[in-house]
Amino acid sequence: MPTLQLDDVTLAYDDAGAGAPPMLFVHGWAGHRGHLAPQAAHFAGGHRVVSVDRRGHGESSAPVQEYTIEQAADDLAAVCRDLGLGRAVVVQHSFDRLAFDFVSRYPELVLALAVIDGPTLAGEAFDAAARGFLAGLESDGWREAIRGFAEQVVFAPGMPEAAKDAVLAEIETVPRHVLVSTWRHFVAYDAEPAVAAIRCPLLYVAGSMPADLDRLRALCPQAEVVELRGRGHFLQLTDPQAVNEVLERFVARVGVPLRTGDRSGG
């Protein structure tokens, strides 16, 4: 497992494949790079693919600190620069405000952005529920709060209870200070200015999360939307073939021809 050192923080990542454009896979809240493993494996056949465990997650360091959206975006920029990715197709699952901040502040590092089932511009009802979830995370009943939130927006219809328990156990491996701080800053971040600043091609793949797709199109006229309903929030795992096909078509439209042996894609 390769790692990248950023001051006193170690970021774990995978780096596979070759070819342009390179692709950067970014997991969501309480996740890890394995949550996009089917996509990374699929695209490594024709592209350089980097999947990273964000600070505080997976096999990366989890210092006791605040976990802001802006710092997470700065970490992604450091990954791109230190690994020489050039301009990448960024694929973000769920934690969309991170991707919007990264793309809006580091446009020179991004060729295109694909968001898989984020609560994009979801509105006050979602934000109110998110604030309620934050209060639950900060309480003694934080485990119950996670289960309640997952039942609403994460689990696929008909998901067995044993599978649900496995997902919840995996979430609880993330240090609680990371869970709380990342969600607090996600809730506080105003995504609209960042979304309005995006000029690169943008794909939104809709699953189970609420999202204001009309507002997205108004702010980002270049945005294209594909709906893959009924697969839960982790649709890249429950139906990887469908997600891979959608991403393949998007990358083919925005990318450049494959150059054999190219490791940078730049």
Image (tube, rainbow, N blue to C red):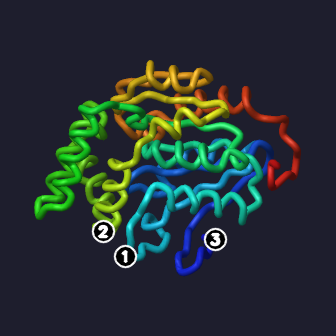
Q: Are marks 1 and 2 in contact (CB under 8 Å)?
A: yes
Using the numbered discs, state the Cα–Cα distance from disc 1 to disc 2 in whole angstroms. Answer: 7 Å
Q: For this view, does 217 lie left or right of residue 208?
A: right
Q: Nearer the viewer, residue 10 or 220?
A: 220
Q: For this view, does 100 lie left or right of residue 209?
A: right
Residue 228 image label: none
Mark 2 closeness class: few <14, some 14–19, many ≥20 residues within 10 Å = some
Residue to which mark 2 is pinned: 177
Q: Write down the quadrant of residue 45 in the picture.
A: top right
Q: Amino acid at mark 1?
A: Val
Q: Residue furthest left?
A: 140
Residue to which mark 1 is pinned: 64
Q: Amino acid at mark 3?
A: Pro
Q: Nearer the viewer, residue 237 or 160?
A: 237
| Mark 1 vs mark 3: in front | 1
Secondary structure under badge 1? loop
Q: Are marks 2 and 3 in contact (CB under 8 Å)?
A: no
Q: Earlier in the sequence, mark 1 or mark 3?
A: 3
Q: Earlier in the sequence, mark 2 or mark 3?
A: 3
Residue to which mark 3 is pinned: 2
Using the numbered discs, state the Cα–Cα distance from disc 2 to disc 3 in whole angstroms. Answer: 25 Å
Secondary structure under badge 2? helix
* Residue at screen point 65% across, 50% down: 106
Please identify the quadrant where the N terminus is shown. bottom right
Q: Is residue 44 visible?
A: no
* Residue at screen point 61% across, 32% down: 247
Q: Position of residue 114 (x, y in %)?
A: 57, 36
Mark 1 closeness class: few <14, some 14–19, many ≥20 residues within 10 Å = few
